[in-house]
Amino acid sequence: MPNPVIFELHKQGRSAEHLPLPAGPESEILASIPERMRRRAPLPLPEVPELELARHYERLARMNHHVEKDVYPLGSCTMKYNPKLHEKVASLPGFAALHPMTPEELSQGALELLVSLEEALKAITGMDAFTLQPSAGAHGEFTGLSLVEAYYRRKGETRPKVVLPDSAHGTNPASVRRLGLVPVEVKSDERGEVSLEALERIVDGSTAALMLTLPNTLGLFESRLPRIVEIVHGAGAQIYLDGANLNALLGIVRPGDVGFDVMHTNLHKTFSTPHGGGGPGAGPVGVKEHLRPFLPTPRAVRSGDRFAWDHDCPDSIGPVHSWYGNFAILVRAYAYIRHLGAPGLREVTENAILNANYLRSLIEKEYPIPYRRIAMHEFVASASRFFKDSNVRAMDIGKRLLDFGFYAPTISFPLIVKEALMIEPTETETRESIERYAEAMLRIAREIEEDPERVRSAPHETPVRRVNESLASRRPRLAWEETADGGGEPPRD
Amino acid sequence: MSYVPHTDRDREEMLRSIGASSVEDLLREIPPSIRFGGALPLPRPLSQQETEEELARLAGLCRGAHGFDSYLGGGSYDHYVPALVGATTSRPEFYTAYTPYQAEVSQGTLQAIFEFQSLIARLTAMPIVNASLYDGATALVEGVWMASGEKVGRSEVLVARSVHPRYRAALCAHLAVSGLRLRELPAGEGGDIDLSMLKESVSSETAVVVVQSPNFFGLLEKTGEIGEIAHAAGALFLQIFEPVSLAILATPGEAGADIAVGEGAALGSRPSFGGPLLGLFAAREAFLRRMPGRLSGMTEDALGERAFTLTLQTREQHIRRDKATSNICTNQGLVALAAAVHLAAMGRVGLRRAALLTQERALLLRRLLGEGGARFPFAGPFFREFVVRFPEEAVRAGLVDHLQSKGILPGIPLEGAYPELGGCRLVAVTERRSPESIRRFADLVRGFRGAERGVRYA
C-alpha cells in the first residue's frame, strides 16, 4: 500500500486548535473587506489531527536517503556532514526572530555577522568584495554575470559572448542566456582540460567572460590556468569562477590571486550548510576591485565600531533578493568558518582530495577512469564498458547502489564522458564507509557479469521500485485531485 | 576540528593504496606558481563551545529580536508557527537530503513537494504550482520572464508603483539587459490602482500587467477588474499574492490571473532577518511547459504502485542547458516543506482563523491609533497592514525613539521608497500581537507629549 497523501487523511472538523478565537464575530471582521474582494472559492485544506500528521511525516521521512543514513557521494553536490551546531545557532532567537527592517542599532549582531562573513570569504578566496544576496549557485552566476555586463556597459563596450567549457554545469549556459548573452562552448582536450587552441580561437574582443569551474567537473585541476588567464585577459575579457568546487581549493589556491575577476561560492556545499532536500542554499558572489561598484545594494558595512547599511551605491545593479540573502544559511556558514579557521579549512580540502583518490583507487580496475590523472575532490568514472558488454547503463548501477543502502553518484554528467558516474565522497566520510561503498560497487561489477538483469531491473530493496518517469511527463499530475467520493486516486485516463 | 574522521594511520594507508607519498603529492598537478603559500588570514579557529558562544554573542546583539513588539511587515510577517513545523523540518531525513534525483530513495521529499504544490494550488485556486523559487522578488522576475516568452513581440512590462519597492528594484536589476521595458503605473489617489489610469496605460505593447494585492500599503486591489482590463488589451495579468491573506481574500485564480507569485515564508518560517524565504509560483495550465523550477509529479513504480518523481525535466538547465526555461537549480526545498506542514497543521479552520484574527487586530490598532491623533492617507479596504501618519509635532519631538525605548517597533518608514509619503510609516499586525500590546502602542502614541524628547535607544 502506498503512503496516503495528506488529503486522504482529511476529515472535516478534526484539525488542532492553534489560535485563540477572534474577540468579535466573524461577520464584523469580514465587514472590513468588500464582498467582491473576499474569497469565494472553497478552501480545501486538509483537517488532520496532530498525531496523524506526525505519523504522516514520519512515514515520509523514512522513505528518504540522507547524509545521516549513509554515504551520499553525489558528485558536484558535496554531501558532507552538516554539524548539529549549525542548526542550533541558526535558530537562536536573536537571529530567527529578527525582522529584516529592524533599525540598524537594534540589529548590530546580524550586520556584524554579514560583514564578518564577507571578510572571511574574502580571506579564503582572495577576492576584494562579496555580496551575500544570491540565494543559490545559479542565482550567483546570474548576479556575477550581471556585474560583468554592467561593467562593460559602463565602459561602452559590447561583448555579447560568454565562453564555457563543454564540461560546464548546465546552470552556466542557462544563466548566460538569462542575461541575454550568448554562450559559446569551448572543447575539452584529451587531458580533460580546456583546449588552449580552441580557447585562443574563440576568445576575442566580443567576449565578456570565460566561465570556468575549478577543479572542473571531471574533478581535474586546469593545470594550464596561467595560460588561460593570459588568453582571456589578453582579450580584455573577465574570468568567472563557478565556485561549486571551492571545497577542493581551501588554503591551496585563492581564485582572486590567480586571475579570477568574479566568482560565486555555494555555501551549502563547501561550508556545510544542509541541502534541505533541494535548498535553501546561498550563492555569495565575490569580485575584484574593478567590479565592486556594481555589487547589489544595500551593502552591510563597518562604520567605526558600529555596523550599518550602505544604500549609497550609484552604480549598483540593484538588489537581487527581497532582502539580504538567505541569512540563516549565512549564519551556518559563518559558524563553520569560525570553528574551522585556516587550518581546519585546509584539512577539509586535503581530506576531500584524499578520500576521492582513495575511493577511486579501490574501484578503478572495474570502473575505468577516462581521464587518468590525479583527482581533486571528486572523480568521474565511466560505465560504458558495462553498457557495451551487458547493456547495463550507469543509471542502472546507480539504482543498484540504492539497494545496498547508499545513494547513487551523479549520473550522466559531465556530458563529455559516456555513461558517467561522478563520485564525491567528501572529507567527512570515514575510511570504512568509503571501503563499504567501494565494495558495493565492485560487487555490482561482478553481478553485471553473472546476472546483468538483476542490475538492469534495480532497485529491488527500496521503498518503491523503479519509478516511471516517462508516465509522469506524458500525463503530468502535479497536484492532488479529489475523486467524487472524496478520496483515493484521481481518475485514470 | 574539521569533522574529518581519519587517524594518521588511516591516512598513511589510504595514501599507500592510492600510490601517493603524501597529500602534497596529490596536489602536484597544480602549477606551483599559483599555489597559495601560508595560512589563510582568518581569525584563529574556535572550539565548538567557543563558536556557539560567539554566535550567541552576535545573536544577543540583535536587540530588535528580544523584548520588542514588532509592528514591522512590508513583506516579512511574523505569524504563529505550530511546533510540528520545526519538529518536521529539523529531521535529518529532510534537511540533510539533496534534491530528489534518485526518486526510489527520495519519496519522502517528492511526496512532500507534491503535497506542497497541491496545497498552494488549493490556496491560490491556480492549477499548477512549482516546487518553489528563491523568494517573492525572484518569483516575480521568473513570472515576468515567463510572460514575456508567451507574449513575444510585446516588450513592455507594466508594473504598479504599489508593488513592493524592493521587488520592483530586483525586477529592474534582473531585466536590465532583457530588452523588456519596465513602465511604472502610478498609484491612484487612494493608494491602489486607478482603473481608468490602467486602461489608458495598457497597450498593444504591454506583455504583462504586474499588480500586488494586498499591495505594499496593505490595500486591496480590484484584481478582478484589473485582470479584465489587462486581458482586453491582449496582455497577461500577473498577481503578486500573500498566502495567509488568501484564507479570506479573493484568490488570483478567481481574479483571472495568468501567473500568480508570492512570498511564502509567512507559512511556517521565522523572519530570520529576511531569509531563507520562499518564492511561490503558480500559473494557468497553458504555461505547463514554460514553468521555471522543479515539479514533482505523481506516477507509478515498476509494480504499479503510486510513486512520485521530478518531472518535465526537459525544461530544466541540467537537461536543456541554454534552452532551459530558467537557470534555477537549488531552490528553497526545506522552506517549502515548512509551508506544506504549516498548511496541513493549520488546516482550513486554522489558516482562516489566523487571517481573521490578524485582520481583527489590525483593525483594532488602526482604530486606536486614529483615536490617538494618527491619520491615514488611504481609506480603502486593507489587510493586515496600513499606512499611518503620526501627528507631526509628536514625530518632531521624537515619538519613534520614544516608542522604541518602550519596546515598540512602530512600522517601516516610507519616505525612502515613496517620497510622497514622507513622515508616514507602514504598520503591520499579525495574530501574534496581543490586544494588550496593541493598546499599549496606541496609548503610548496618544500619551506622548514630547516630554522624553532626546531619549535615544541604542
Image (cartoon, coloured by chain):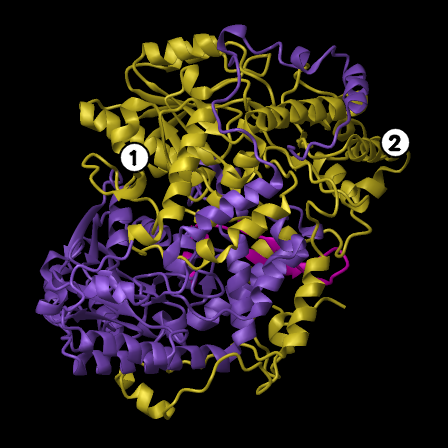
In the picture of the structure, the residue carrying the numbered disc 2 is A446
- A221 relative to A102, above or below: above
Give coordinates of residue A492: x percent, y percent.
63, 69
Residue depicted at 29% across the width and 35% down the height: A295
Give coordinates of residue A191: x percent, y percent.
60, 12
For the C terminus of chain A, the image quarter is bottom right
Please state the chain letter of the residue tagged with numbered disc 1 in the rendered image: A
Is A60 or B354 nearer to us in this picture? B354
In the picture of the structure, the residue carrying the numbered disc 1 is A295
Image check: A287 left or right of B351? left
Q: What span is in magenta?
A: B285-312
Residue A305 visible in rendering: yes
Is A94 or B135 nearer to us in this picture? A94
- Binning the other alpha carbons within 10 Å of mark 2 as few (below 14), some (14 to 19) or many (20 upward) gives few
Type of amino acid under label 1: Leu
Colour in which the image shows chain A? yellow
